Each structure stands twice: as C-alpha cells, then as structure tokens.
C-alpha cells in the first residue's frame, strides 16, 4: 500500500482530512517511518541475505572486531566465505571458555554479539583477512519520503497496522486540540498486540537462553 494512501486512511480515521491539518505532513511522515522501524525492531519483519551493505562483513587480519550496519537487528546466520556456518553467540556463552579472547587462528568459529555497540567480536582473532556472509533481520534500508511511489518495505499485510503507532504519536502530542491520552493508550496497545512491546527482543532472548544450561562449550 502506498504511503500516500496510508496517510489518507490515517487522516480519515483521526478526522484530520481537511486543511489546515491539526497534525503536519512532516510530523505524520516521520511517525510512519518510526512505525515501520519499531515494527521491524520488535517483530523482525525483514530478513535479508543478499543486500551487500548489510550481509557482507569484512574482517581484517589480527583485528578481533568487525563493524556491522546499524540497521541490523539480529544476525540469524553467519558463514565465512568458503567455510561452513559458524556460531552467533553471546558474551555469556563465550565466557564459559577460559581465555577465549586470547585465541588466534585462521578459521572463524563464532561471532560474539553483545560486547561492543556496532561491532561483533570474532572468535578466534583471525590471522588473515576474511569475508563473512550473514543473514540478518534488519530495519528498512531507507526512510520513506513524500513521493507518490513511497511505500513501506515490510509486507503489505502489515501496512495498515502501522496506523496505530502514528495515532499513538499524534494523540500524545501536547496540544489542547489533539491530545487524547485514552485514544493514545488504546492505539499503542493495538500496535503492541500486533508487533510486540518495546522489550520484545529481550523477551525473545530470555525465551531462547533463560532456561538452558551451558554444556560442553555451548548452551544445551
């Protein structure tokens, strides 16, 4: 669904279809971009294996850190080119292995995800340059603009669900004519029912690791 149609539907829903608008075009556009980003962050709606700027990582010899694109939400799979897939592990998992940060080698065994913002830690530290191919859930590649062909990158069945985030943002504006806390709460509740709460990624991590025991070098 085109963004212009989504905005028209949203303005009809909130009774703001006639100029001068209560909520500006610029604000509504920003809120729709926020909505798509939040939906992707919470529900991991976009999975990518082919966009080079997202899915190709270059590791430099003797440097344990590799930067990743900030649009990545979570790495689902990683494979050094020419080798089999490797682990995508947390610092807590790795710390069950003594002195792992001191290890070096020629073949990558794992990427550690939560040691530094914007970077993965390689295990072991590689002694040769290496290219890694990843599959990741990510945010949209770019914000939508106000052109007639702009539309969300997420699948079409989710497009109308974005309206609830925009309603929440609009009804939360501190303005005597537009503020409506009850409608704001209701809209946010609908959005969260569809895409998850702000802590959805933490909840997913706890479901994955919270009740598992570390056995033989990895979580069982």
Image: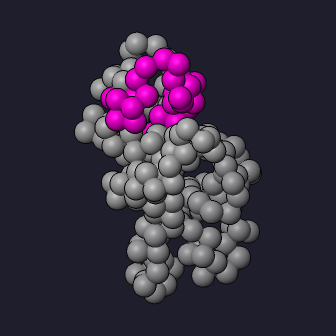
Q: Does residue 53 show up?
A: no
Residue 196 within the segment the image draws in magenta: no
Q: Residue at x 43, y 51 (%)?
A: 183
Q: Is residue 84 above or below residue 145?
A: below
Query: 209 and 201: which one is in front?
Result: 201
In which quadrant of the rendered image does the C terminus lie?
bottom left
- Which residue is found at the position 67% from the left and 72% from the top? 100
* Residue situated furthest front in the rendering: 176
171 left or right of 193 in image? right
Q: Position of residue 134 (x, y in %)?
A: 47, 45
In the rendered structure, the answer to whether residue 210 lies left or right of residue 8 reads right
- Does the magenta stretch mainly form a helix, a strand or a loop? helix
Instruction: State the extent of the magenta-drawn residues as a range.
Output: 9-37
The N terminus, quarter of image = top left
Magenta residue check for 25? yes
Name the one closer to the observer, 18 or 32. Answer: 18
Q: Is residue 5 visible?
A: yes
- In the figure, 16 relative to 107: above or below? above
Q: Position of residue 55 (x, y in %)?
A: 49, 39
Instruction: Decide which of 182, 129 is in the foreground and name it.
Output: 182
The quarter holding residue 161 reads top left
Q: Residue at x 46, y 13 (%)?
A: 147
Identify the residue shown where x is 34% and y is 29%.
Answer: 12
* Image spot of residue 139 (x, y percent): 49, 41
């Amino acid at each position: 669904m085109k963004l212009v149609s989504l905005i028209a539907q949203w303005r009809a829903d909130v009774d703001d279809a006639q100029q001068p608008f209560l909520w500006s075009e610029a604000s509504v556009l920003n809120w729709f971009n926020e909505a798509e980003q939040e939906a992707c962050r919470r529900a991991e709606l976009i999975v990518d294996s082919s966009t080079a700027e997202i899915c190709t990582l270059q590791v430099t010899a003797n440097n344990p850190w590799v930067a990743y694109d900030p649009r990545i939400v979570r790495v689902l799979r990683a494979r050094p080119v020419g080798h089999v897939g490797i682990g995508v592990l947390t610092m807590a998992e790795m710390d069950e292995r003594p002195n792992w940060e001191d290890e070096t080698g020629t073949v990558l065994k794992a990427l550690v995800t939560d040691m530094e913002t914007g970077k993965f830690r390689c295990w072991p530290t590689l002694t040769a340059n290496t290219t890694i191919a990843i599959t990741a859930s990510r945010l949209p590649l770019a914000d939508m603009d106000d052109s007639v062909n702009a539309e969300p990158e997420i699948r079409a069945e989710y497009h109308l669900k974005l309206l609830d985030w925009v309603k929440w943002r609009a009804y939360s504006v501190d303005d005597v004519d537009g503020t409506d806390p009850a409608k704001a709460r209701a809209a946010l509740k609908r959005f969260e029912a569809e895409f998850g709460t702000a802590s959805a990624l933490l909840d997913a991590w706890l479901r994955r690791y919270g009740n598992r025991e570390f056995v033989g070098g990895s979580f069982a």
